[in-house]
Amino acid sequence: MSYELRFTKHGNVLFEQGSEPSFLKNYLEKLRDETAINRNDTVINRNETVQGLNVKVWSVDNEVVLMVDNQDKSDNNLKKNNLRTGSDHRKDHKKDNKDHSKDNKDHSKDIKDHSKKNNDKDHKDKNKKTGRKWLGDVSQLDYSSREKVPSESSDEEVHAIDNLFSENNTSFFQRIKKTLSIFKNNSLKNKNENTLLTKLELKQLTESLIEKNVSSDIVNHILSDIKNLKELKQKLKNILKIKTINLNKKRKFALVGPNGVGKSSTLSKLCLLFLNQSKSVYVAACDTFRAGAIEQLSLYVEKLKKLNKKITLHQEGYNKEEAKVAKNAFKHSTNYDVMLCDTAGRINNKNLLDSLRKLCNLPFDEIFYVNEALKGGTTDIKEWDFITGIIVTKLDTVDEKIGALLNYTFYSDKPLVFLCYGQSNMDIEVPNVENIIDTLIYS
């Protein structure tokens, strides 16, 4: 038998492989009680026998690795998976310090050389016209014909794109449920839904919801006059609207939202989702401002083409008016089942949002607002009054603190459409109200 489990010290499962041992749950509960595992400064290094099987557990930073073998294969598996134990790191520490001292000397020399080169370059280019700036005013959006040279994708960006096409069959809420079963002791789990909530339980619910990033205004709203869990769940259901996307006819979608929240990678996930439903996809690269945006989409599309999928990228280069690019894409996408339009990120500025409305006035079937789970405590979404649905990204970074889902739907009165929760192109799912509510109440 061979089994491996990796999880954070707060219980979020990162990886699982092999058949789960029958004693696992009890063993992890014992581990939690004996080691204060949920503290970031806790160091774990255990090797013991349980029911005739070798169990090895160790921590690396904020992660814990558990391996179970019928023989002592842990070290071999460790090397195979390129994992490091605490003792491995300590052995290398002295060597690293010596190398670090040498690197510092070399680094000082590099800084001097780099500074000299920059000074020379500044002297030569001081009269050269600077590139386009975008400081929050629509008047500074430059649609001139001057060619923009996009930045090359970094190694990290290319690696991230490769990761998008790795398989992952575990949904976000499956991970959360496993987390709850291992690490959470919630007194409400065994409470009858119709039983009156005590003042203490209401206080605990208030604190718990706020800890999960639910806005305090919303917490007061949903807990103000409830008597039991049944009423609480109904209030949450009234807020958490879900929309299912119908692909029985040709559809055109636009993705809008702030900078840096994962719109382009979300678009790639939607591409694969629709392609796997035997739909042809036309991608419109309407982010003509961010350097490298078109190249990023091109890489996604080329990867998907290798899967023998019908997908095409429409792009007209940089410094073009995005509404015109989208309008041309409409004309060329008539033979495709789905058109997906990527747009430039916007800050919450009235003039910038008004310029985006020009694009969104085109006959899109849906306009998806994309934002991340870490930024859901704000009412800024109210300014995006032209959206029809919400996609929340980066849920894997917040574990059970999913209050953003409630905040977005409450302040916009718009439905959730998709949830994204990882680097794999498969890490996207349709929201499930019951899963969201259970996580908010019982975690």
Image (spheres, rainbow, N blue to C red):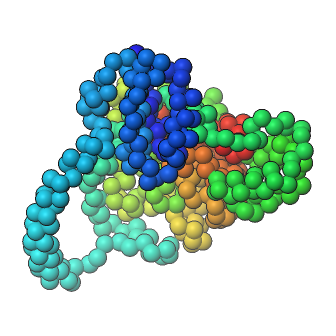
Nearest the camera: 286 or 405? 405
Residue 10, position as x, y percentages in the image = 53, 46
Q: Is residue 105 left or right of residue 232?
A: left
Q: Is residue 247 left or right of residue 233?
A: left
Residue 272, position as x, y percentages in the image = 46, 33
Nearest the camera: 222 or 365? 222
Asked whether residue 360 appears in the rendered view, the answer is yes
Residue 234, position as x, y percentages in the image = 83, 43
Question: Quick check: 404 above or below 168?
Answer: below
x 15%, y 53%: residue: 95
Question: Quick check: 107 above or below 344?
Answer: below
x 13%, y 57%: residue: 99
Asked whether residue 255 appears in the rendered view, the answer is no
Q: Is residue 298 left or right of residue 195?
A: left
Residue 385, position as x, y percentages in the image = 68, 60
x 30%, y 23%: residue: 73
Question: Quick check: 5 above or below 388?
Answer: above
Image quarter in which the C terminus is found: top right
Image quarter in which the N terminus is found: top left
